[in-house]
Image: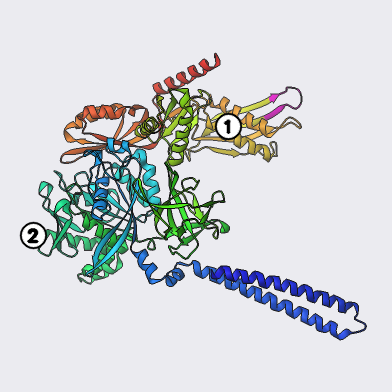
Amino acid sequence: MRVIRAVAALNISRTAASRQGARYFSLGYRVAVDSARCPAPQLGNRRQFSATRYVASSAAEAALKQAKDMAAANMTPEAAAARMTPQEAKRLARVRNIGIAAHIDSGKTTVTERILYYTGRTKAIHEVRGRDGVGAKMDSMELERERGITIQSAATFADWTKKENGVDETYHFNLIDTPGHIDFTIEVERAMRVLDGAVMVLCAVSGVQSQTITVDRQMKRYNVPRISFVNKMDRMGSNPFRAVEMINTKLKIPAAAIQIPIGSEKEFEGVVDIIDMKAIRNEGARGMNVKVSKEIPEELKELAQQKRQELIEKLADVDDEIAELFLDEKTPTPQQIKAAIRRATIGLKFTPVLMGSALADKSVQPMLDAVCDYLPNPSDVPNNALDRSKGEEAVQLVPYNSLPFVGLAFKLEENPYGQLTYMRVYQGSLKKGTYLFNTRNDKKVRIPRIVRMHSNEMEDVAEIGAGEICAVFGVDCASGDTFTDGRLPYAMSSMYVPDAVMSLSIKPKKSSDADAFSKAMNRFMREDPTFRLHVDEESEETIISGMGELHLEVYVERLRREYKVDCEVGQPRVAYRETLTQRSDFDFLLRRQSGGPGDYARVVGWIEPNAEHPEQNKFESRVVGGNIPDKYLAACGKGFEEACLKGPQLGHKVIGASMVITDGATHVTDSSDYAFNLATQMAFRKAFETAGGAVLEPLMKTTITAPAEFQGNILMMMNKRGTIVDTEVGADEFSMVADCSLNAMFGFSTHLRAATQGKGEFSMEFSHYAAAPPHLQKELIAKHQKELEAKRTK
């Protein structure tokens, strides 16, 4: 407000100065005309004129400087923190924006159900897969309840009361439950983009699994601090300390247990807090009552002391204060240990590991206390925007209600009431009925309704403070758009969107369903950036692309259920690539005359493999003497790019190609950008024939987990499909990592279920492109030529 007043005052002073200057200028002019009769006033007026100008300009400069200083002071985190009221500071300190992320079937949704129950958000616990006819609250989609998997991330909020120094303190959680399947990885990406912290759930038997590594990579990409929760402690073969060791070795992040289990497997009773040296057990219906005792079982005292020492040693490696105490051979107090864990966790140097069993309703509440103790509030995490007025210079945002608004739309969802936009408020506050500006297209939008989400339920609110997550209606935008109140030229970086790896041809069975089909496709593409659609120009088929078989299968099923559109689905299409293996020279002349100006362009050079970057294309000009003008060279570069979009062998993209143009010729009237663009494309295609063209296929990093008794069956299956990279055999199950051709993995889930009596599971993610086997290359090229011939004869 002060800034606005200062700028207003500045404008008034400038206006006054200009008027005053104009008046004195006219006086000076009149006196100059009558200078012979009265010379004295001329000097006086001139002096007065110059003096007034000086005073006015100095006042303007002072006001401008004051406005700039005030604006700068207001925008610094330190100044904002100093001006923050105690109530606002307390509200912010009690906010936690957290996500639950893990490998498939580690128990994320089960953990979330317990959190909602223990915080009082739900009155009953319902299990995954909807065995009781209700299903988990956070799996609101019918498909999710049937399959027992999370497909869409679901947001909710809850309040947790924690005792601190004998006083009850209420913490506000904004919670997002994310999917575990790699096919729905975009849901995890956008959740991690806007969260301040996360709970990484691990299985006590399997420890770190393939998708755990993917989730860890996503957390590191967005600098999200995490605590780890080892779930399923009541399962046979559970070993939490193996899971801790795997976090240290496989995820390369220092970790140490802050609890040890009381009992194991079926005898699991609770945990011992090795920081405060207390035993924690759950009692009563569904483990609602937490019993804390200072009496640790005699057989666990030695283990508790040993693990406490390990925790202190691990903290000494990542925290200076504990390191000093450790070197001085002093024992840190529980408060010092907790403070060090919080510093190291927020600094992304450490993750504390807790343990329990969500399904058995044991030791979930201590994990909620750890979220309050060790994960950051919105002001603890630096969130940066890009200042577009200063060449996208990074600017730190401050979660303070009185500052100008900055928010990020991170997820879209179609709703019976219209488009629902999930938004994270980074700075300022958002009120119902206010106007915001979309920085991508500078459109002004009104916010008619603000809601807090509880899975698929909504609760209307009038205002949302800084650091919170909410959803708004009536805003037409794209995922990743930044919104401001118009006072700041800020934009925020969007999230990482992986490339699609699989395609299917699709069309509605009835032509009358075309409108509903089109509407559904538009909605799915808006909601999910990894779901893409295009029409193939040659076959005129509608092609949908996504992250895997399950991903596309879910969307086809949603079409049938939500839009009542039955579709015919073609064979899955693999995103092949083409490349060249040797150098090929060209000297191509394009000369066409068709009455009036013709087309003339000559290009000379060569194409060769791009050895430096095998998955990128490169265009280079070495023309000397101006034989090809610069404007035509730009057209040559564009022609090369266009030629690479559709390779000569299969019509797929060309990668790893380098084109060098050394010479050429032009015509006075017939040469043009179009002629050189076309000549370059034709030269590339002709040279490609003698450049040793090869077809590349996508290799998928495939991770299979199954009971150890089926190891032989799976080894036989995988030897036919790819190259085995790593095998790890545990007590009861084994895991295998292999690089497999995507083409060989279609329908693999059915074969795996048959080979493991339904007990095996697998996940795939894109690894890299590699040359396809020679027989497959010949088959693919022959098939493509046959399709082209069929089109020509139509």
Indicate yes or no whether the magenta region holds residue 132: no
Range drawn in magenta: 591-601
Residue 679 is left or right of residue 550, and the answer is right
Badge 1: residue crowd in 10 Å (few <14, some 14–19, many ≥20): many
Q: Amino acid at mark 2?
A: Pro
Residue 223 is situated, as x and y percent measured from the top left of the image, at: 38, 54
Residue 633 is situated, as x and y percent measured from the top left of the image, at: 65, 38
Q: Residue at x 31, y 64 (%)?
A: 343
Among the 4 quarters of the image, the one containing residue 55: bottom right
Residue 746 is left or right of residue 684, and the answer is left
Q: Residue at x 48, y 52 (%)?
A: 448
Name the mark on residue 297. Answer: 2
Residue 291 is left or right of residue 560, and the answer is left
Residue 103 is situated, as x and y percent measured from the top left of the image, at: 28, 43
Q: Amino acid at mark 1?
A: Trp
- Residue 681 appears in the rendering: yes
Among the 4 quarters of the image, the one containing residue 413: top left
Q: Which residue is mark 1?
A: 606
Q: Residue at x 10, y 49 (%)?
A: 267
Q: Nearer the viewer, mark 1 or mark 2?
A: 2
Q: Observer-nearest residue: 734 or 520?
A: 520
Q: Residue at x 9, y 63 (%)?
A: 295
Among the 4 quarters of the image, the one containing residue 755: top left
Badge 2: residue crowd in 10 Å (few <14, some 14–19, many ≥20): few
Residue 552 is situated, as x and y percent measured from the top left of the image, at: 38, 32
Q: Observer-nearest residue: 98 or 616?
A: 98
Total labels drawn: 2
Indicate yes or no whether the magenta region holds residue 596: yes
Q: Are marks 1 and 2 in contact (CB under 8 Å)?
A: no
Question: How much space separates mark 1 and mark 2, taking CA atoms?
Answer: 78 Å
